[in-house]
Amino acid sequence: MKVITTKNEMKALSDSFHQRDEHIAFVPTMGNLHPGHMQLVEKAETLAPKTIASIFVNPLQFGQNEDLDSYPRTMERDQQLLELGDVDILFSPTREEIYPDETSNKEVIEFPGLSDVLCGASRPGHFSGVAVVVKHLFETVQPDVAVFGEKDYQQVLVIKKLVQEYKLPVEIVTVPTQRETDGLAMSSRNGYLSEQERQTAPLLYQTLCQARDQVKAKAGCFSAIEQQASEVLTKAGFKPDYFSIRHADDLSEPNEGETRLVILAAAWLGKPRLIDNILI
Ligand code: AMP
């Protein structure tokens, strides 16, 4: 596996792949890789002859009081995993490489109604940071297809919107959320959980499953189901941020009886804020 740290070198190599008509599948990450990430890599490998992964802890998507400095960085181990996973190229640029000056640090890409609701409401600027970095990465890596996890459901919709609005020539493919055996969605931030919190954490997914069953059985209006779920989480020690039944395509608030739905939840459990979702 070749490791590239500069945009110029990455771009030149991608250019050479395109000249030879070798398609590129791309998996952007922030590192601290777990089997969920590796599932994206596996998917990418089925989609194109060249697989490129990136590791970049993107400062623009962290709020002022968030965990940018303490975010787990495990580059050596990540490299080994990607190597074992047959990735062709790892692109791991420095902050200066992606954001060389003040102006690039201040770029904003918002999609009102999509990037400012749910996680976007509690983490102002987060999805703008995601959109800005993904646009930079796409322009540098020039993938034909990019793979993202459904665990970050809102992020997927923001990226699809980014591709549409900026007419970026890349197809977005998604992979279902990979879970621990007890149902907890795998996440780099699960490492922040204490032993006791780790035992409680699967309740987030269990509550989503229950809410899905209630929606399917029409057992109550959406707001009653949401409220009941939040209460269950609160009683167990979570601090729910939101538990929300939304339209699956654009996260708008659905009318009762609508069927293309997703239920999304975010809740603090000790230090980490866990997110998860379930499609109906
Ligand atoms: P991150 O490193 O957290 O920015 O995640 C990089 C990519 O991995 C994103 O597309 C995430 O949605 C995806 N991802 C993270 N956790 C999981 C998971 N448990 N299952 C599937 N994809 C995931």
Image (cartoon, rainbow, N blue to C red):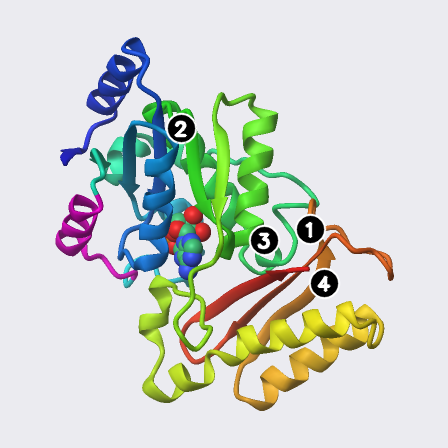
Report the disc number at residue 120.
Answer: 3
What residue sits right under mark 1 in the picture? 248
* Amino acid on which disc 1 is placed: Ala
Mark 1 lies on a secondary structure that is loop
- Give the left or right position of residue 256, taking residue 162 as reference: right
* Amino acid on which disc 4 is placed: Ile
What residue sits right under mark 4 in the picture? 245
Q: CA distance from mark 3 to mark 2?
A: 22 Å
Report the disc number at residue 138.
Answer: 2
Could you tell me residue 216's position as x and y percent?
76, 68
- Label 4 Cα neighbours within 10 Å, binned few <14 / some 14-19 / many ≥20: many
Q: Quadrant of the C terminus?
A: bottom right
Please tell me whether mark 3 or mark 1 is closer to you in this view. Answer: 1
User: Of the residues under marks 3 and 2, which one precedes in the sequence?
Assistant: 3
Q: CA distance from mark 3 to mark 4?
A: 16 Å
- Label 3 Cα neighbours within 10 Å, binned few <14 / some 14-19 / many ≥20: some
Number of residue marks: 4
Mark 3 lies on a secondary structure that is helix
- The answer to whether the residues at label 3 and label 4 have Cβ atoms under 8 Å apart is no
Residue lying farthest top?
Answer: 19
Q: Which residues are magenta?
A: 71-85
The picture quadrant where one finds residue 147 is: top left
The picture quadrant where one finds residue 156 is: top right
| Residue 79 among magenta residues | yes
Q: CA distance from mark 4 to mark 1?
A: 9 Å
